[in-house]
């Protein structure tokens, strides 16, 4: 039985830790995060899963001393929000592996699913890869793609990502524990990188096309902070939209906006201030 240290958070962390527990991996220690009181907690709790299964967990800054004390054979990171130093990753003789929420080398960095929806992508996915000193740049062990529908929100896509991550880990786990998961180098010439997003990034630029505005709305729709605009001194959240090919006839519609390229129907909005 292999011993593991797991760094995990959110629903992907919960799903992948569940796989390790089910497969009999001896998880000696879990590092997770304290929940941010200013953030909506719509995802599953890694901390609760560790407690339920009697696995020691920590929410402080990882240290070489704490990790080396449990002598891990392998280290996993599943949606953990901080970079893990190399002097910790190097403690695991079988390697250190991260589950990333994109099809690498595309969308390295933060908020991968949100950016993919914002950019109008039709496909997202997960990648299991070796962790190196550079974020999201290590050899790829495996990938699984999921479709992005034209009206799906980032949350819709994320809920496809969660089980995809579990299936991918299941497929790759035996090779990892046997030391046979060298993986394939990434093509850095194809890499793209995106940074974190803030609530302020949800402001709508009405000079953009209907499709671009629609993509922003669905990229940051609930449970994310949302897209917004201002009118007569009021802040208005735009939660749901639809792109129309032509002006509708014979029916009432919530609100229609003519953009520089296409019609946008506002289906759900909220005046917040």
Image: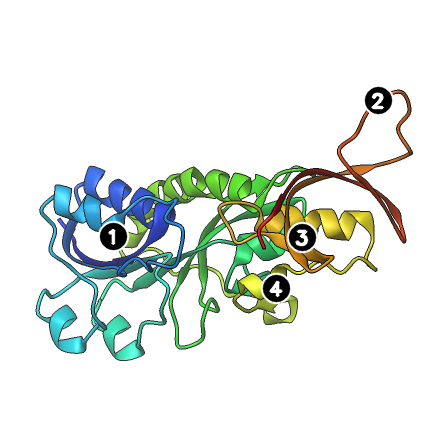
Using a 10 Å C-alpha cutoff, classify the residue at mark 2 as few (fewer than 14 neighbours), some (14 to 19) or many (20 or more).
few
Left or right of 46 on screen, residue 106? right
Q: Which label lies toward us, 1 or 3?
A: 3
Query: Could you say where residue 56 lies in the image, as x and y percent from the top left?
Result: 11, 56
Give percent across and percent down for residue 106. Answer: 59, 60
Residue 103 in view here: no
- Camera-nearest residue between 196 and 67: 196
User: Residue 251 got which mark?
Assistant: 2
Is residue 108 depicted above or below 9 in this figure? Answer: below
Which residue is drawn at the image coordinates 26% and 49% (left, top)? 46
The numbered mark, 2 or 1, whose residue comes first in the sequence reads 1
The residue sitting at 17% across, 48% down in the picture is: 50
Query: Label 2's element?
Result: loop
Q: Is residue 227 left or right of residue 61?
A: right
Q: Quadrant of residue 251?
A: top right
User: CA–CA distance between discs 4 and 2?
Assistant: 34 Å
Disc on res. 216: 3
- Element type at mark 1: helix
């Amino acid at each position: 039985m292999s011993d593991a240290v797991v760094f995990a958070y959110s629903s992907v962390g919960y799903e992948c830790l569940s796989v390790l527990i089910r497969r009999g991996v001896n998880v000696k220690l879990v590092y997770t995060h304290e929940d941010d009181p200013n953030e909506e907690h719509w995802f599953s709790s890694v901390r609760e899963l560790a407690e339920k299964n009697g696995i020691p967990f920590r929410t402080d800054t990882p240290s070489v001393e704490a990790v080396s004390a449990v002598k891990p054979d392998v280290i996993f990171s599943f949606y953990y929000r901080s970079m893990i130093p190399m002097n910790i990753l190097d403690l695991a003789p079988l390697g250190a592996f991260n589950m990333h929420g994109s099809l690498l080398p595309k969308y390295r960095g933060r908020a991968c699913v949100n950016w993919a929806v914002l950019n109008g992508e039709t496909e997202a996915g997960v990648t299991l890869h070796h962790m190196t000193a550079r974020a999201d740049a290590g050899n790829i062990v495996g990938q699984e793609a999921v479709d992005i529908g034209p009206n799906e929100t980032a949350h819709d896509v994320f809920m496809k990502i969660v089980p995809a991550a579990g299936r991918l880990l299941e497929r790759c786990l035996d090779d990892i524990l046997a030391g046979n998961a060298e993986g394939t180098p990434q093509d850095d010439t194809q890499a793209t990188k995106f940074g974190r997003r803030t609530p302020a990034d949800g402001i709508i630029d009405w000079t953009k096309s209907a499709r671009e505005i629609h993509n922003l709305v669905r990229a940051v729709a609930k449970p994310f902070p949302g897209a917004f605009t201002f009118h007569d001194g009021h802040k208005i959240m735009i939660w749901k939209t639809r792109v129309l090919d032509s002006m509708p006839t014979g029916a009432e519609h919530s609100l229609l906006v003519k953009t520089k390229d296409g019609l946008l129907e506002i289906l759900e909005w909220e005046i917040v201030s």
